[in-house]
Image (cartoon, rainbow, N blue to C red):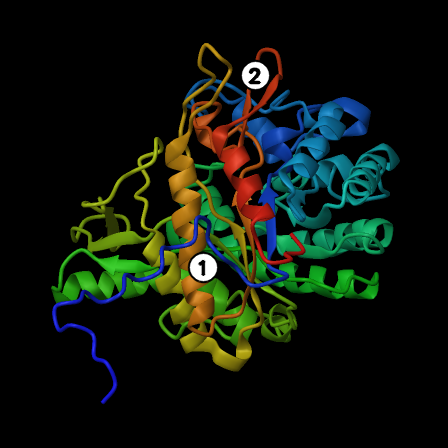
Amino acid sequence: MPDQPPAHEPAPAPPPAPAFPQLPPGFRFGTSTASYQIEGASTEDGKGPSIWDTFAHTPGRINDGSTGDVACDHYHRYEEDVALMQQLGAGGYRFSISWPRIQPTGSGPANVKGLDFYDRLVDSLLAHDVQPMATLYHWDLPQALEDDGGWLNRATIDRFADYAAIVGERLADRVEHWIPVNEPNVASMMGYSIGMHAPGRALMFDGLPAAHHLLVAHGRAVQALRAAGATSIGCANNHAPMWPATDLPEDIGATKLFDALWNGMFLEPMLLGRYPVDLAPLLVEEIHDGDMATIRQPLDFYGVNYYNPMRIAAADEDAEMPFEMRELVGYPVTDFGWPVVPDALREWLIMLRARFRAALPPIMITESGCSYGMGPDEHGVVDDQPRIDYLDAHLRAVATAIQRGVDVRGYYTWSLMDNFEWTEGFTQRFGLVHVDYETQQRTPKRSFGWYADMIAAQPRSLG
């Protein structure tokens, strides 16, 4: 009879969790930025004004009264910033191209000096082993186009397609991934429905045409980029799990409606070629023949920008909108007041795959990050442990989703460096690198070192 262990012997301890999140070989780790938030040089080398130039210079619009005129001065310091990316070991960098730097009025011939800047940036990235992911539109619409109606004017779609063709012709041979439009839901709702972002129009449901035009513009840009030789094109849609405030039918109904507006109105047209059934009647007059087929272009990846879930309740009967956001209690919050719920990212990714299956291309996390305001101590160290905890937990959530069958190919953290945070100005810091806006000194934070160590610890990662 074989020896038996004593009955009281404890079970072997489970193996310790790995020191770093473990992603599959080839997983792409990157960072993200946007042109208006970092470039500065707002009037240099022929650049025209954007709606954010106008909006930021309007008194009362930006919380600290600042503008992006200088921002992080990346236009002049891009070589230093690319060297930081190489030091980080990041395999990818998502940046956006300033439309008014390419076409100062949003139409007509290209501004050669503007194209030359992005040419130099892309070449520098490749020389430092960092693959470019270029976003054509991260909200800085040429002001001249806004003067003609902006995204409420269907003619802006044609202007955007022309712009995409110009940029694609110059850069498609070297840019690995392309994104036509960043967060069309935020651009349309915050800019045209609520008025909190540029151009500052508060049209409520009358702002929906802007959403449709942004989606058609996305499709037209995909076509133009393909014609220019681009081989990997996706999107960057801001998504959030929607949680009803209570189990009451009115709160559940309001949550479903807001989920359709925030998530479904952009997911379903891109992947299925249709609008959510509850919203379709609101858009019927905007849809021209062929629009839905144009929007539903084949995508090589589906980009998810994730920050936090939202808690929704039914609004009072006399409210302008039928839903309202409630505080999500019981979770830690960032300095922005946003709840930190990494498991909601896992939830969203698994739900996305379950819902769309064969219609869903591989996923990229094109933005995910957090605002914590600590600066350098007396030794020059920026100890941002909460950001390390955030990144660790969210990358583990992605790893769990992958283990459960979701095809996620990369994670681009927001952001490479602190920058101009839209209406918050310089009051919120999302970067792995601290920026002193007076001196423009860059100081890598502890999270930068952690991210670099995590990347280096991956199994033969390309990123």
- Tell me where residue 314 appears, x and y as whole percent: 19, 56
- Tell me where residue 171 appears, x and y as whole percent: 82, 50
Q: Is residue 195 visible?
A: no
Q: Would you call the spot at circle 1 few (<14 residues within 10 Å), some (14-19), or many (20 or more)?
A: many
Residue designated by label 1: 398
Total numbered labels: 2
Q: Name the secondary structure under disc 1.
A: helix
- The residue sitting at 48% across, 42% down in the picture is 191
- Tell me where residue 199 appears, x and y as whole percent: 52, 37
Residue designated by label 2: 437
As drawn, is 202 to the left or to the right of 129? left
- The residue sitting at 25% across, 52% down in the picture is 311
Amino acid at the residue labelled 2: Tyr
Sequence order check, earlier mark of 1 and 2? 1
Closest to the observer, 243 or 106: 243
| Contact, mark 1 vs mark 2 (Cβ under 8 Å) | no
Q: Residue furthest bottom?
A: 1
Q: Is residue 303 visible?
A: yes
Amino acid at the residue labelled 1: Val
* Quadrant position of residue 63: top left
**Where's the N terminus, which quadrant?**
bottom left
Closest to the observer, 19 or 370: 19
In the rendered view, tell whether residue 417 sits above or below residue 148: above
